Amino acid sequence: MNMHALLPDVSAFLDNVQGLRIGAEKIETAEHLDVENPSTQGLIARVARAGAREIDLAVATARAALTGPWGALTPHDRGQLIWRLGDAIEENKAIFGQLDALDNGKPFHIARDVDAVYSARHFRYFAGWPSKIEGRTIPVSVPGRMNYTKVEPVGVCGLITPWNYPTLMVAWKLAPALAAGNTVVLKPAEQTPLSALFLADLALKVGFPPGVLNVVPGLGMDAGAALAAHPGVDKVGFTGSTETGRRIVEASVGNLKKVSLELGGKAANIIFADADLKRAIPGAFWALFGNNGQSCTAGARLFVHRSIRDDVVRELAKMAEGLSVGPGMELKAHDLGPVVSAAQMTKVLGYIDQGTAAGAQCMTGGARQGETGYFVAPTVLDNVADDMVIAREEIFGPVLSVLPFDEEDEVLARANDTEFGLAAGCWTQDVSRCLRMADGLKAGTIWTNTWGDTDPASPFGGMKQSGYGREMGGEAIALYSQTKSVWLG
Ligand code: NAI
Ligand code: MG
């Protein structure tokens, strides 16, 4: 196999990766995380692993930076630093791309040209905000008083991120947290800590005061739990599973820290009989197979009108068979890489077996691909019923379930019959129906005749058990701010 050579900067970084990034220091730890390449099952690096003691140190360091040099910066200067970080990410997009391709497994060209580039844009969008976070003067009815509001940072933010988009999920939280004036302790996913560590080094290089961004890889159950429970943390921003989201809420009660959660999904994607199938079929295909199904917005329940269902399923299976699947660092620009870990592969294959045992029909895929690396063959399951476990739980892998339907009212009710509510959408040439579905679907994002678009200016988040709070846009600034009401007598 022909692999991309490691960039000299990536080799140099991996040689010096050791240490938690706390303040300007690299702090060694007794225990370590073995970072595995899911494409090869080889060891990429052994990185420092934070426990409760190191979380204490990171939180104290973030607190000192908040009341120190960072808090003293003007909005202009804060915005300029955030812009510079965006530029630096884009200048180093090949490094970010290789790091994410190594520990997540996703194709290098996608990690570089999509994940890294969109991360850079996210920082640039939020770089404009610091000078535009305004309070109000309120016309209170108390004689002789003036009242105004100030919008202030929440304080020290603990950011806990997942492994599916290692750089981008950090960007989504870190950019608004910094723009609103907070300092951060970031715990990246244990499977994919490399790009977050590189980002910490880059932030110092572009001029962020030490302590504004601290990066502390570790396991969820110790570093993550310690951060979520820490009395010195004012807010936790989390993306990951609904199960872990619940634990984070429980851990937050001690000091009643603010929490925002972007959790799992089981998005319904509906193809009506009048859809433009030339767009709807590839759209629905990539809605699930994009990022190998490892997206919270994956269009996992594909409802297809019974009259077109056979044609659609045949086409989807053909497209799945045409996908190029291979190691993230292979020179050949693959469409998909492996799933992130052995545990994830076992879980995904288990769901496939459970689905076929329950009566779903496997049209293609259905098994591990190859013997090395955690590759799951792109899988299309037809005849999936609403009450099957595979139609209710998040699979988070390359498994597309097709569910036939007959009527609009029926499919709307079935689409909403889920505990999740992150995204949903439909394909139809009837604009009135688009609007009816946008009204009726219970999800934080609705895509009609498209799927997967996001933009740093447009709010993103979940209804129901997909979480609370909206990331992106002005709503993300609000998520990382608090309002003070000032009275003058
Ligand atoms: P997870 O939700 O457990 O992990 C996400 C992050 O939370 C990681 O940084 C992890 O270290 C941390 N974490 C875990 N337990 C914690 C705790 N008790 N306190 C604080 N932080 C904790 O997700 P996991 O176990 O990696 O994947 C399991 C499933 O979760 C996936 O199969 C998928 O269904 C879902 N998931 C959803 C994501 C999304 O984007 N909504 C992203 C990743 C996973
Ligand atoms: Mg977990």
Image: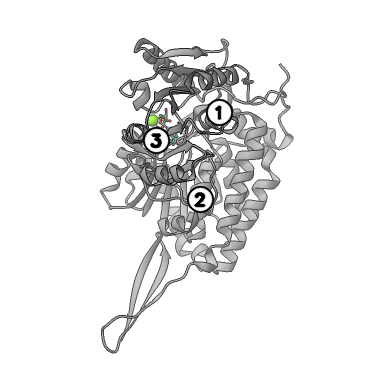
Mark 2, other Cα within 10 Å: few <14 / some 14–19 / many ≥20: many
Residue at the disc numbered 3: 264
Q: Could you say which disc has been placed on residue 211 in the image? A: none
The mark that comes first in sequence, 2 or 3, is 2
Query: Which quadrant of the picture is home to ligand 2?
Result: top left
Q: Residues within 10 Å of mark 1 (few under 14, many from 20)?
A: many
Q: Helix or strand or loop: what does disc 1 sit on?
A: helix
Count of numbered tags: 3
Spot occupied by residue 479 in the image (x, y as percentages of width and height): 41, 56
Question: Taking 124 as reference, is 217 left or right?
Answer: left
Numbered mark located on residue 281 in the image: 1
Do labels 2 and 3 touch, CB within 8 Å? no
Q: Where is residue 203 shown, x and y percent of the image?
A: 60, 51
- Tell me which amino acid carries mark 3: Gly
Q: Quadrant of the C terminus?
A: bottom left
Provide residue 221's location: percent of width, then percent of height.
36, 33
Classify mark 2: helix, strand or loop.
helix
Q: CA distance from mark 2 to mark 3?
A: 20 Å
Look at the image and tell me whether residue 15 can be seen: no
Q: Is residue 83 above or below residue 417?
A: below
For discs 2 and 1, the disc positioned in front in the rendered view: 1
Which mark is drawn over residue 174?
2
What is the basis of the colouring in this image? one colour
* Badge nearest the viewer, 2 or 3: 3
106 or 257, which is in the foreground? 106
Cα separation, mark 2 vs mark 1, equals 35 Å
Q: Nearer the viewer, residue 257 or 435?
A: 435
Q: Toward which corner of the image does residue 127 lie, by quadrant? A: bottom right
From the Cβ of disc 3, is ligand 1 less than 8 Å away? yes
The residue drawn where x is 55% and y is 47% is 25
Is label 3 or label 1 in front?
1
First in sequence: mark 3 vs mark 1: 3
